[in-house]
Structures are given as structure tokens and as C-alpha cells.
Amino acid sequence: MNQKQQTMFDKIWDAHFVATRVDGRDLIYIDRHILHDLHAPHAFEKLAAATRAVRRPDLTFSMQDHTVATKPGRDENTNPDGAHFQRAMREGSQRNNIRLFDLDDPEQGISHVVAPELGLVLPGSMHAVPDSHACTVGGLGAIGLGCGTSELEHILATQTIALKRPKTMRIWLDGELKPGVGAKDVSLKIIAVLGTAAGRGMAIEYAGPVARALPVEARLTLCNMTIEMGARSGFIAPDDSVFAYLAGRPYAPRGPEWDDAITQWRALASDEGCVFDKDVRVDCSDLAPQITWGTDQSQTISVRDTLPILPADTEARTKLERAYAYMGLEPGTALHGVKVDRVFIGSCTNARLSDLRIAAGIVKGHRVHESVVAMVVPGSTSVKRAAEREGLDRVFKDAGFFWGESGCSMCAGGNGDRGKPQERVISTTNRNFEGRQGKGVRTHLAGPELAAACALAGYIADPRDYLETAR
């Protein structure tokens, strides 16, 4: 009798299944998890109040990233609003014997950046973070799960999480990306086509020639945005590119264990003929650089397109009218050429070394427009160190960019890095909601190529116009 064909998600879920609770949720074993300074202190307090210990401190890691200042020479008091969180994180981690990546640690950074670069997360693993963008690590062929404070307390005490088994979805990406177009453009296009609720409660596998051709760090970007469709997690089947990326990483297996791991990882791919609960295709053949114009990620257009006309439908019209009013834009007009006040290149979406190389390639030999405040904040101290070895910091600083220390920075502004009311910000982050980067701030999401081009032009610009001079 033939064994039932399984999706990649089925294989990983079943391998981590512990039991089914009386409420119908499955208990799933967590291989490793990372805490951060904004939410972990409260979970530590709840755990202490219940007189419960951390079950596996050896599988638990703490990261200072959300509230840390990015100014050179920073300490915990540089951002006074974050000092309490950082001290509580330090004390809770020490009390529970958890490895802490503190401000002065050479590997400190954003948890979703540090975990892959250290090999803390591996193909086929279940990885949890008290942050919605835990799905980032799906680029390595893992299942990343965001969790709330109560769920985090449960994980700390039991090394398991209780979840209802998600349904599965495959997004098949056809075509081949053209110069100036990257993973961020793919993710924004997917959300523009499918909507912000298309993956609600689902586990999404990205497949097809575009997904397969993406470098590993670009896959992390694509998977990072999965939560913006309401999904539980997003991932790509691991392959030789992923194995090469992980080889020699500090927490990756070595020797015979590495060889055994490769054999297991190769078997993770979805079986031929397996059935997904939902299967869609998105053609990326003619994809141009994408940019959001409104206040959710589905309100996205190609950089040279005109803004959409208001529909007749009352509910949809009201939503768009509010977005236009907040963003200070008019239907039917061009977005290309609209004045820009600030550019931010950073976050767990686009602050890896490859992102900084891409942006620096466009910036080199140019100057930031006099009306623009431009910032680059590396995703980790390791990324910062590597970029400085390559001279990328000098490229940005010579052009007039601020070059910061690693942290979440302007993504949600938890460290004080925010825009001013009505400022128009081009941001390589993942959310453009009202007030996300400061009260009244008008955020446009884009990839590092487009963000760099806007910093130079002083308006919303097409990065393809800079590609020839960048070569």
C-alpha cells in the first residue's frame, strides 16, 4: 500500500507532533526559540509568579533588538524609553540561564536576521519567536511561528506550543525576475494580487522557478512578508543553496551529523502529486519594481503606474478614500515623481548583507538629495561588520546616509527612530499602517533598490534608471 503523499508542511508538523489537547489544538515541539526585549520580560514575570522554570534554556536565546538605540556609541540609556526593557531582559535571561545577545555582543542584531546567520534555525525545524515575522526563517525550509506572551510562557515552561493545525497553501511563482526587481517586489505583488487576508490561518509554501532561483537571503525576505497575508507561516523547500549557506555556521551540525542532516533535509520537499488546500499561481515574468501607495500592503502598484481610480463599491471606495486622505495622494495621478522626505533601509525584511550591497551599488558615486534624511541600519552586528569590511559603510556615509548600529529601528519605531507628521518615508520594512513609523507618517514600502534610488532623486524614483550608472 502506497504511503499518503505529503506536503512539506505535513512532514514537519507530523515530526514535531506531541499530542492533541482536549480543546482540539495540537501540542507541537519547538526545536529552538528566540526571545526579544519587548515581550520576553513580561513572560519571565509570569513564569516566576507561577514558580515555573524554563524547561530547555539550552534551546532558548535572548536578543536585544526592538528597543535598542542605533546611534554609534549607544548604551542602554541612549534610548531612555527602552532602558527598562533591556535591563529586564538582561536580568530575566541571567536568572533563567539563557544565552543573551546583549548590546555589546558581536552577534547582536534582529532575531530573524541573527537566527539564520548563526545556524540557530535549520531546515525541517520548528522555530518560535514572540514576533509576527518569525516566518522569515522559512527561507531556510523551517517553520517559523510567531507567538504571544501567553504562548511564550507556555513554550518556556514546556518547550511546546498549542496550535490548531493550519490548512496548506502553495503559491507557485512563474517567470524570471528582471534586473532591478527583487524578492520584496515579488512579495508586494503577491499581496496586491491575493490580498491581505488570502492566507489567513494557513501555512504557505512558495514554489516554482522564481522561488527556486532566489538566493537564500532573498528567500528570507519573501517569507518574512507571509504574515502580511494573515498566514501562520511561509517557507520554501530547502536545496543545495540552503545547505551551502548553512555549512559551517556556529550552531549547524558538523561531521557525520551534517551528512545525516543533509539526507533528512532533502526528503522535506513536498511529494509529487500531494494536495494543498489552496493552490495559486502568480506570474512574475513582467514584474516591475513595486511600491505601496496606501495604508496596507495590498495597496501596491508598479513604480511607473498611475494610482487606482476609486471604485463604485461603497465599502471599497471608503477604504481607498481614507488611504488617499492619509497619504496625501489623488486617484489617477502618478506616484513616480512625488517628493520624498526620508528613506530607511533596514529591518528584518531588507537589512542583510546582500540588501546593503544592492543599495550601495545604486548609491555609489552619488549624493543623497538635499531634502532627504536617509538612514541605513544593518540587521545585525555581523552584517554591519561584514559591510564595513567591504567598504559599504563608506559608500553610504560618503553619499550622506546615516550609518547605524544594528536593531529594529524605524520598522516600528520602538527605539525612538521615527518620522515626523506628514513626512513621506520610503521604507524597506514590512508594514505601512497609519502611524506605524510615527504619528501621521506616510510610509511607502519598497525594496532596497527603489529605496536607494529615492534617496538620491528626492522623489519616488525608478531604480532601473540608476542601474546603468551603477554597473
Image (cartoon, helix red, strand yellow):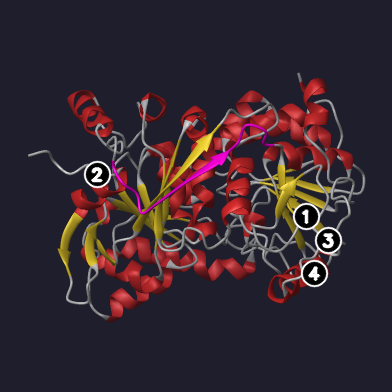
Residue that carries the numbered disc 2 in the rendered image: 6
* Of the two numbered discs 1 and 4 in the rendering, the one whose residue sits closer to the viewer: 4
Q: What residue type is labelled 4?
A: Tyr
* Of the two numbered discs 3 and 2 in the rendering, the one whose residue sits closer to the viewer: 2
* Of the two numbered discs 4 and 2 in the rendering, the one whose residue sits closer to the viewer: 2
Residue furthest toward the bottom?
49
Q: Which badge, 3 or 2, comes first in the chain's sequence?
A: 2
Classify the position of the C terminus by image quarter: top right
Q: Can see residue 104?
A: no
Query: Disc 1, disc 2: CB below 8 Å?
Result: no
> Between residues 162 and 276, which one lies in front from this camera angle?
276
Residue that carries the numbered disc 4 in the rendered image: 326
Locate residue 133, reporting x and y percent: 49, 55
In the depicted structure, whether residue 35 falls above or below residue 6: below
Q: Which badge, 3 or 4, comes first in the chain's sequence?
A: 4
Magenta segment includes 301: no
Q: Give the range drawn in magenta.
A: 274-287
Residue that carries the numbered disc 1 in the rendered image: 425
In the depicted structure, whether residue 311 falls above or below residue 109: below
Magenta segment includes 284: yes
In space, the residues marked 3 and 4 are separated at their CA atoms by 11 Å
Secondary structure at badge 2 equals loop
Residue that carries the numbered disc 3 in the rendered image: 423
Locate residue 6, reporting x and y percent: 24, 44
Q: Count the marks: how many? A: 4
**Residue for point 29% across, 76% down:** 48
Residue 82 placement: quadrant = bottom right
In space, the residues marked 4 and 2 are separated at their CA atoms by 46 Å
